[in-house]
Amino acid sequence: MAEKLWEPSSERMKTSNMMRFLEAVNAKHGQALEDYWGLWDWSVSAIEDFWASVWDFVGVETSAPYERVVDDPKKFPGAEWFPGARLNFAQNLLRHDGDRQALVFQPEGGQVRTVSYAELRAEVGRVAAGLKAAGVRPGDRVAGFMPNMPETVVAMLAATSLGAVWSSCSPDFGIKGVLDRFGQIAPKVLFTADGYTFKGKRFDSLARVGEIIRDLPSIEQVVVVPYTEAEPDPARVSKGTAWAGYGTPGAALEFAQLPFSHPVYIMFTSGTTGLPKCMVQSAGGILLNHLKELVLHCDLKPDDTIFYFTTCGWMMWNWLVSSLAVGARVVLFDGNPFHPHAGALFEMAAEQKISIFGTSAGYLTALEAAGEKPGERFDLSALRAILSTGSPLSHESFDFVYRDIKADLQLASIAGGSDINGCFVGGNPLGPVYRGEIQCRCLGMKVAAYGDDGRPVIDTEGELVCEAPAPSMPIYFFNDEDGKRYHDAYFDVYPGVWRHGDFIRIDSATGGLVILGRSDATLNPGGVRIGTAEIYRQVEAMPEFADSLVIGQSWKNDVRVVLFVKLAEGVELTDALVRKVKTTLRTNASPRHVPAKVIAVPDVPYTLNMKKVELAVKKVIEGRPVLNRDALRNPEALDFYADIPALRED
């Protein structure tokens, strides 16, 4: 059984939103649920009662009630949620008012700026009036090529208040990456900052925007937001207009009342294996699921300050901004998290008294490697939860958090995807944290692990599937009239069951889960499936390595494991070090995990959302094209893999 690292106090459990929700379910539905696992079982068996209970608990604001929760809970895909309800996404996020801080903006190395709830509402009203005057109507697309700053939040809320559909990329995307996304959805208005900063350097965005809009004939207006300059010239781009004079100051907020299933966001897949898929998500579904996760799984309350290290090109930005519906204080950061020093984000956490701190597994690994001990340097007394996603969180990172950040907090490793704009598995405020494990399957998500025979398995590796629909699943893919691309993405392996593409193990003793890597990157030496995360965990704990990437290479009618390692500064890949790697993997994992080849590389390629791209490397090695290098943060890293003599040898 996994080692228990932390558990909540009885007082913390008693005052949690999750416990209040459990008690409300017991009272309303005549249940006698005693713990999270009983609540989860009920949530995936009484699907309609569960989602209706979430609706009531988080207080969804509507102008017309729903007729029923779902037309057919067994219709998967295609279930229609909350028919009859009329609501507006932005209205629910702007339900709070007054002088309380809504947004705190910390630019890299810059001065903190705050926006109150009253100021936020006023700005949204002003910008919405500008969009309305520009002819934006329900269903039109509005796009952002923006840093993670308050104006991005304002633009999104202004667009969705009118019933427009929001989609965004961060400004570090290349031109082709932007066109591959926005070119498919034909936005009417584009919001862009004049530039952005990273590692203390300023980067211009308007030159690239000028090239982008030449290939986006749908764009009728470009709104230029000041960031790196006080008063950028909007005339630098065609159809440009200045943010400061946009819209009508003092304009009253108007919220288009639309069906629950009206689209609110278009999210994109990473696009490393082809043109990004455009996943259209519903206003009601995203709102309800975000609030379920924020209020119940994260225990977010109005007096909390929440932060997630993200860009506007990652779904965690959308997720974070929904915290406004709770009335919480939302911290936005833009730039490099290690500038001007490695502890910058935790210094910010101390100054802003952040209570819920979200980041990526890669950040925590890098922070430990930098020798940081935030708990010794900063006052983190307000911090009660750390969330981690983006890639599996190693056992060693669990140790680092509890040893060097804070001993008394909930470390919630969470996982899901842009597909659902949320989580399949995540944190449980009522339960303990076990080393290396995600705490639970999320409420309302009927998650299982399927073995090779397509049946549920426990305590062994399997495909992550979801056996029942949930409101935040895409309503459709853009430009997918017959639904074939949607079906093929999730339902082509198990009819009527969502196959997510992760390889997982569910622990029968703890109820926790371990993500073992992407199932499409799963290794199959000798016909036995193993997850890449098991190798990364061992290798990246070794001080000789800065990073690693592993693939399965087809070789002599089988598959052999090939491990690429980025060496730490001053380290050479000697025969002795290769033997150490193999011995470590054989001892701590299994003989199946031992690589046939260990090869030093100058860099490991990542997506813009900091996910390793095993499949892109595999394609390069096999001589197949990588269609969208602009989806990578460091596309030049792929070049090295195109011709490696060692891969042609026994």
Image (cartoon, helix red, strand yellow):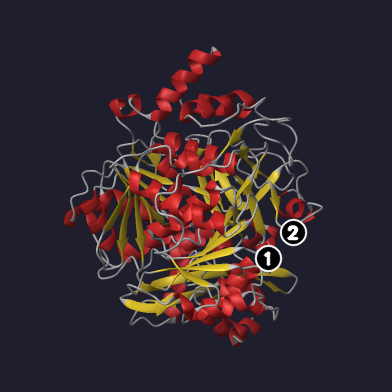
As drawn, the label of residue 247 is none
Horizontally, residue 477 falls left or right of residue 156, namely: right
Question: Which residue is the site of mark 1?
Answer: 184
Horizontally, residue 564 falls left or right of residue 555, namely: left
Residue drawn at (50%, 44%), measured in percent from left and top?
90
Q: Quadrant of the N terminus?
A: top left
Residue 187 falls in image quadrant: bottom right
Q: Which amino acid type is marked by label 1?
A: Gln
**Which sits in the foreground, 216 or 176?**
216
Crowd class of label 1 (few under 14; some 14 to 19; many from 20; radius 10 Å) = some
Q: Is residue 377 visible?
A: yes
Residue drawn at (39%, 48%), measured in percent from left and top?
122
- In this rendering, the answer to whether 190 lies above or below 332 is below
As drawn, the label of residue 479 is 2
Q: Is residue 591 visible?
A: no
**Tag 1's secondary structure?**
helix
Crowd class of label 2 (few under 14; some 14 to 19; many from 20; radius 10 Å) = few
Q: Which amino acid type is marked by label 2?
A: Asn
Residue drawn at (66%, 34%), measured in percent from left and top?
81
- In this rendering, the answer to whether 552 lies above or below 140 is below
Q: Quadrant of the C terminus?
A: bottom right
Residue 201 in picture, x, y percent from top left: 33, 78
Residue 475 in picture, x, y percent from top left: 68, 46
**Tag 2's secondary structure?**
loop
Tell me whether circle 1 and circle 2 mark residues in contact (CB < 8 Å). Answer: yes
Residue found farthest to the right:
482
**Which sits in the foreground, 558 or 377?**
377
Residue 208 in picture, x, y percent from top left: 52, 79
**Which sits in the foreground, 636 or 186?**
186
